[in-house]
Structures are given as C-alpha cells and as structure tokens.
Amino acid sequence: MAEAGDASAQFNLGMLYYEGNGVAQDFTKAAQWLGRAAGAEHHEALNFYGVLHATGKGVAQDFGKALELFRKADKCGYNCEPVYDDLPTDFRDKQYGMELVAAKRDFVRKARLLAAEARCNVGLAYHGEATDATSRKVARELFLSAATPGNGKAMHLLGTMCRDGAGVPASEVRAYMWFDLAVTAGFAKAGDARRELIDRMKDKDVARAEKLAARWLRCFPLPEGAAQ
C-alpha cells in the first residue's frame, strides 16, 4: 500500500523503520517513507519528518528545514486541536481489531511527545540567537506548539519569555500561568520560578493566572507521559 502511494501506509511504515518494530531499525529508510508521506501533506508525517531534520536521524540535521516542516504540519492540521485519547483511526484499523487501534494510538502519542521535544529544541536554537524580533517570534511559535501536547520545558521557557518581556510584552500573570502549567506537566524547575513570582504578585493576579492555566488544561489536557 505504501508503494502504491497510500500516505497513511507510508507514515506507518516510516515509523516502523524508525522504531525498529517488526523490521531492522533504519533511520534512512524511515526518512525516505516519511518524506514520501510528507510530500502528500500527511500532517503526522510532516511533523515527524521535521523531527528527523531536527535530530539529524536519517537526514542531515537542519533546523531551518525542521521549522519549515513543523509549520507546514500545523497548516495541514497538526496541533490545531486538543490531543485527546480518541485519536482518529481509519477503516482498516477496525478490520484488524481494537488491539491494533490501541497500538496505533499509543504509537501516535509517542510520536507527538518526541515531536514536542524536537520543536522545543529547535525553538531553543532560535532563542539562543535571538538578537532580533524575528528570531524571538520563531522561538515563541515553536515553544507554543511544543506546549500544546504538554511539553513542560516549553511551558517553562514561555513563562521566562513573559516574565522577562523577551519577544512578548512582559506579564507576570502570563508568566505565572506558564510556570504553573510547567509544574503540572512535571517540569520541576519551573516551581522555583513560580515561587519567586508569587512573592511579589497580588492575590487577585495569582488567581487570574491560575484561572488561565485551568482554562488551558481544559482545552489541551495533558496526555499520559507528557511531562518532560
């Protein structure tokens, strides 16, 4: 099916090669199949093909290409909706039973967590060179897209940007919100930053920040294993 041009099959086959699941692990073959699926604008394939470019597995490491692929994945529907447990499945999954459906959902969840980490790392590369507004904007964009599926490190970095006014208007309320979310996601380092803020914030502002954090979690609940 992958050879016949089925983008979903190409994505699945690429990920099997990436994980070495049922076949010998081969990042080059993974990149080849994911690249073909990405060419058909399969949003999961676009996203994970970006991961390969961010990590240099199967292809030359290229943060610019990774950014391009992440942006295209988002444009094609990736990260635009909350990540719920009932990830979409196609009709073939039902033919093979619920065991396969559960395996595929777990498979995609893991891929999204790896992608969040890769997006965060690419964002850090831009943030480290943030001598201009454009680089800071790119860093924030990548941190936000990594925070959506629950990456605590990205949430902490967004909090730091809001606290310091780096590329965004300074806001202790927004900073506290992101630090609070980062702690909830399991990124313990954010706890110190949150405590420093709470000592100088008014009670009403803390309450507002906590309300914003709760609203974020309603829209983007943390999936199991999301803490980084």
Image (cartoon, rainbow, N blue to C red):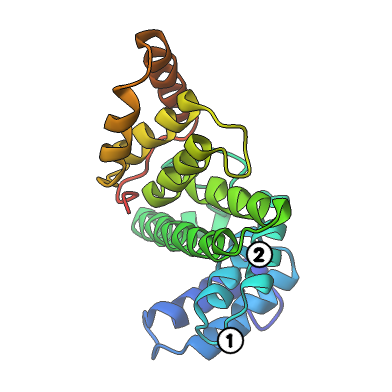
Residue placed most toward the observer, 125 or 115: 125
Q: Residue at x 30, y 36 (%)?
A: 184
Q: Position of residue 100 (x, y in %)?
A: 39, 61
Left or right: residue 118 compared with residue 97: right
Q: Residue at x 61, y 81 (%)?
A: 33
Left or right: residue 12 compared with residue 199: right
Looking at the image, residue 164 lies above or below residue 218: below
Residue placed most toward the observer, 128 or 13: 128
Residue placed most toward the observer, 162 or 109: 162
Q: Earlier in the sequence, mark 2 or mark 1?
A: 1
| Numbered tag placed on residue 30 in the rendering | none
Q: Residue at x 66, y 69 (%)?
A: 7
Q: Residue at x 72, y 54 (%)?
A: 134
**Which residue matches tag 1?**
59
Q: Position of residue 205 (x, y in %)?
A: 43, 14
Looking at the picture, which amino acid does disc 2 mark? Leu
User: Dot 1, how many residues are within 10 Å of its Cα: few (below 14), some (14-19), or many (20+)?
Assistant: some
User: Dot 2, how many residues are within 10 Å of its Cα: few (below 14), some (14-19), or many (20+)?
Assistant: many
Label 1 residue SS: loop
| Numbered tag placed on residue 67 in the rendering | 2
- Note whether residue 76 is visible: no
Whole-number angstrom distance, CA of label 2 to CA of label 1:
15 Å
Q: Position of residue 218 (x, y in %)?
A: 44, 26
Looking at the image, residue 87 lies above or below residue 14: above
Looking at the picture, which amino acid does disc 1 mark? Val
Label 2 residue SS: helix
